[in-house]
Amino acid sequence: MDSREDRGGGVPSGGEERTETLLPAEPSGGEERAPDPGGRRTGTPSGRYVLLDLLGRGGMGEVYAAYDKRLDRKVALKLLRPDRSGDREAARLLREAQALARLAHPNVVAVHDVGVFDDGVFVAMEFVEGPTLRGWLADEARPWRRVLEIFAAAGRGLAAVHEAGLVHRDVKPDNVMLRPDGRVLVMDFGLARPAAPEPSEAGGESAIPIPGEASRRALDSSLTETGTLLGTPAYMAPEQLRGEPADARSDQYGFCIALREALSGAAAGKVPRWLRRVVEEGTAADPGARHASMQALLALLQRGLRVRRRRFAVAALGLVMLISTGAFVQLERAHRARCAGGEERLVAVWSPERRQALESSFLATGSPFAAASWRAVAGRLDAWGRRWTGTRRSVCEATQVRGEQSPELLDRRMACLDRRLRGTGAVLDLLAHVDGERFGDAVSAVEGLPSPEECADSDAFLGRLAPPADPAGQEELAAIEEDLAAADALVRLSRTSEAIALSEGAVERARRLDYPPSLAEALVSLGVAHIEAEHGEEAEEALYEALVAAEAGGDDALAGTAAAQLVWAVGFSQDRTEDAHRWARLAEAVLRHLGEAPALESVLRTNRGLLLFMEGEYPAASDDLRRAVEIDERLYGPDSLELSATLTNFAVPLLQSGRYAEGEVALRRSLDIQERALGHGHPTTGDTVVNLAIAVSNQGRLEEAVELARQSLDLLRRAHGPEHPEVATALSNLGSHLLAVGEVEECLRLELEALALRERLYGPDHLFVGISHNNVARAYRELGRYREAHASYEKALAVVEAAAGADHPIMGYVLSGLGLTWLREGRPDLAVEPLERAAAIRRATETPGGELGTTLFLLARSLAETGGDAERARMLARESEGLLATAGRKYEDTHQEAAAWLEARG
């Protein structure tokens, strides 16, 4: 695990302003090339992007290869054609961006940015080299199995679209691309719409203001006249051709039409009848006669393919062995019978009686969340049981039926599975005593059960030292792993002192056993428990020893995990970021050596992403955390609380860099997962609601933000008690939202409470304490208590600079606030220096345009009022006015003030 429960709340900005766009203005310039056929000049910089080459043109838009100067990477930039740049077309392109922003899936093209380019809207997307699916099929005749593999990947992307509540509406081979590394991507969401209207968003505003459409959400708006067809007729379902609303079954129709076309050109072998039947059902004229969903369709395709392969394997084996069919069947049955009995073993741990007892225990709490939480726990336990029995059968048949592994390896794998089952029993014992406030932790504990599939990983087994062969040693090893499973569950149940004690006992037993892999596992468990208890030095000591033991035992994956957890232990718990990055590089090197280790990569991406966030590297943090989302969705499933925690983490750098609409999408998905698992209003949702309030506030919905912030504070106090880091975050954020609606005295009270709590938790020199000093100073200023405001700003500057450096983005907030305070006092001469520093920091970092624009306007005022360079002051004000014009409703007043100031000076 990766210590996520205490991270989802992120860091309150403590800033003065927020915005909705990612486009800081830059002076134009650079070499120009000849105009391309669309009339634009490639090579002309605009903001952070430089156009390179025209890649293609459609009925509405043009797609360019472009260079992202800020992140030093190539992207695909989709813009409106100059002759199609009206309000309606702009809203349609924006809708495509909003559709993509709802998704984070390996088979759906990623959207990086949305903004304004040459007075029109653009979408910056992942640059994909490779052919479209149509081009790939046309290059050569393909075997039907290979065709099916590619379509299945595209189908998984389309299923993710539907799970996000969207309908693509234009599914065809031209809208699927194949990368050189084999990844298949669904693209072109210009016609995407929600599967059903969302009443709560009706009348809301667009993520980016568009002339004529500013009062409507582009994704929810209808941009077609009645009877107008949008899509490609050859792939459109009959209901679309009739002008009726499209749903997921309409996308399924287009998918199956494309698959039928592709199979008609298959190179070898007759396409089986079962596959033709599946495709025909997907192209039924009546939507109700089609498959229930894309997931149901994909399941049929995969099941039919497995049955076909199994039949082929049996037939081939019969020919080689030259035995009669009857004799073969009898022999196979005898071998398979040896592999039966997994269900009986499972029932010894997860029996109907134990299920009933646990359910009664949950319901006896009287909690309003008991029923929903029990369903989540029971469903996950059932799924784990199916995985365990399936893995056990497969491992056994690898020796007894298929002859693929030695009896010695079979014994090791079976022993591993038995130990996993014992560990699950230990966790179930703990769940019998969970109270209603900890139901979310109970679900998390079940999701963290030891993986059965790891026992089937032959590479890991062959590289690791063999376990003890004597019965006493094997029993001791099983007892240690049982304790470690319980310790992991105790951490997830927030019982860290018990987890530490149990892990310490396991460490001592592993030392006596003298089996390095077991010692490494116990030390990692101990290190994670210390991380959760905020014991940084103890965690570092345990994890370093774990890495050494893992290397001695030949367990590369465990060594990488120890290194990845050291990123958190030294980077967050001890503020040693350089050391943390060294451990991250080591973990990444192990990951490259292993080739694929999703659990390790998830821990590394999460811990490094949050470290980068703390350092103000928001784009890099977003990239790491977006990848963690993709991994966790595959690893734990789309309804897991693990995924929910990662989505919340992913939203944090999005919010801090001003990408509020994208952040809100991730947070609402996270909240939906939590509420489906635990019920509405469960305390576990508090972290997510904290950040949702920030996203909502910075899109101008201030009263909604205050209500969400009050809700989050109550939830987190119930979840963690009063003395917890997330409670401090909730206090501070509620204070900020109250300040925005003019309740300044209440804001100051909450910010002082948050400051005192953070000083108790972290000591006086932590970055979070510096942020709290800034928030307190801001409240003092708004009350006109300037001397106290200055004292707090000085403390904030000293703590933030010592903890994070003089150029950290948080310094921009503090310096800008200090400059505003001097202006309010009528001392523009003292405001210039901090505002100059703030402007330099905000230009150099990923700062939202509204915040940079506000700082530049304050600096322009200060220069003008001190008789400084009048022309520079006007230039700064003009630049500020341009940034504020596209920064969203929150900055309308500042934008009007800047415009009036400029007009008054000619």
Image: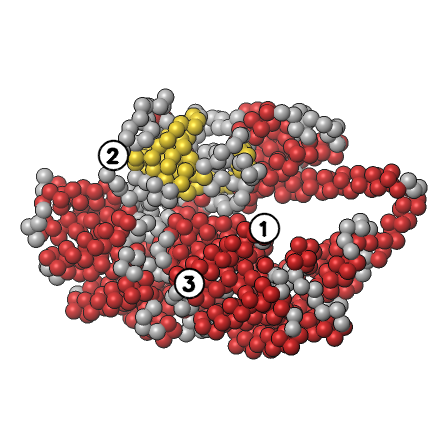
The N terminus, quarter of image: bottom right
Number of numbered markers: 3
Residue 414 versus residue 889 in the image, above or below: below
Q: Amino acid at mark 3?
A: Asp
How far apart in space, not on screen, are marks 3 and 2 (Cα)? 40 Å
Q: Which residue is labeled 2 in the image?
A: 29
* Left/right of residue 651 with respect to residue 589 in the rendered view: left
Q: Amino acid at mark 2?
A: Gly
Q: Place residue 519 in its image quadrant.
A: bottom right
How far apart in space, not on screen, are marks 3 and 1 (Cα)? 25 Å
For image coordinates 72% across by 27% down, the residue present is: 268
Q: Earlier in the sequence, mark 2 or mark 1?
A: 2
Whether residue 795 appears in this view of the structure is yes
758 and 362: which is toward the camera: 758
Q: Earlier in the sequence, mark 3 or mark 2?
A: 2
Q: Which residue is labeled 1 in the image?
A: 596
Residue 138 versus residue 704 in the image, above or below: above
Q: Earlier in the sequence, mark 3 or mark 1?
A: 3
For image coordinates 31% across by 73% down, the residue present is: 764
273 and 717: which is toward the camera: 273
